[in-house]
Amino acid sequence: MRALYAVYRRELAAYFETPLAYVFLVVFAFAAPSFAWQVGRLFETGRADLAPLFDYMPWLLLVLMPALAMRAWAEERDHGTLEMLLAAPIPLWAAAGGKFFAAWTVAACAIALTAPMWIAMNYLGNPDNAAIATAYIGTLLIAGGYLALGQALSAVTGNQVVAFVLGVGACFLITVAGLPFVLDALSARLPGAFAEALAELSALARYESLRRGVLSLADLVYFISLMALGLALAITLIDARRGAGR
């Protein structure tokens, strides 16, 4: 655990030593309320809740989380520091975990910037705070899933832009997998069981129940499994690179 914590501190410091974290936080602080106010018409719903904010959160996160994760391994390869990291007495799982938790911490800070909206809802009315808290948990979980996928795709290239594009593509696919237009298109060409299995993989469907304030073990297991899968894939890809001596 010491190795994981050491990597976590190194990575978290690296985010704030460059403009990346600050730019990310500023963009999120403006984009999230803008979606809620301009697109979701937050103050026109006549309800004291944050549904318009959480409605658009997955679409915002599927772009911003890969931007946060793209540097995880691609930057190490680009700067030639990956070999030094792999040669250090640090287990690969600790390196991947430290990078992931550092990025997740920055994401959590960004999500926390929307807390004034929650405070405003309590000032203006009597919202269901338990439901809002559950929606925040869902937002953190889907952000973690996107970050893990982004880190895995960062391990396949030394170009951060390519890693970002691949990450956005993967997050988009796993988000839209359960949407009706996707399932209808697939059902016409593939067995119904395949479409049903694909719907189960949809991050958006799992997030929706949390967004409504329903906290279930199945949804928690799904997002934890998604994060574990992304990190395991990243570890496998980096380990294969180390084994190949590249």
Image: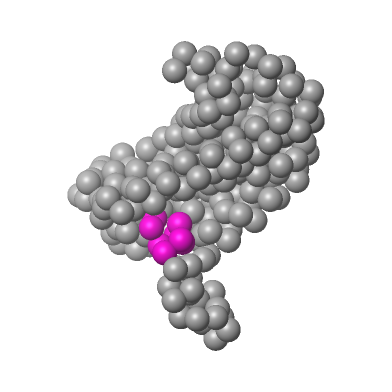
State whether residue 89 appears in this view.
yes
- Report if residue 12 is visible in the image: no
Residue 123 location in percent, x, y? 26, 42
- The foreground one among 9 and 38 is 9
Q: Residue at x 66, y 39 (%)?
A: 237
Q: What x and y, as percent, mark residue 80?
A: 79, 23
The residue range painted magenta reads 200-207
In the rendered image, which quarter is residue 170 located in?
A: bottom right
Residue 61 placement, left or right of 239:
left
Query: Coloring scheme of the render?
Result: one colour
**In the image, what residue occupies the spot 61% across and 24% down?**
15
**Furthest residue in direction front, as rendered:** 243
- 65 over 168 or under it: above or below: above
Residue 83, percent across and down?
74, 21
The part of the image, by quadrant, that contains residue 77 is top right
Q: Residue at 55% across / 86% down in the picture? A: 188
Looking at the rendered image, the quarter that the N terminus falls into is top left
Task: Identify the residue shown where x is 53% and y is 32%.
Answer: 100
Of residue 220 and residue 59, the one placed in the foreground of this image is: 220
158 in the magenta segment:
no
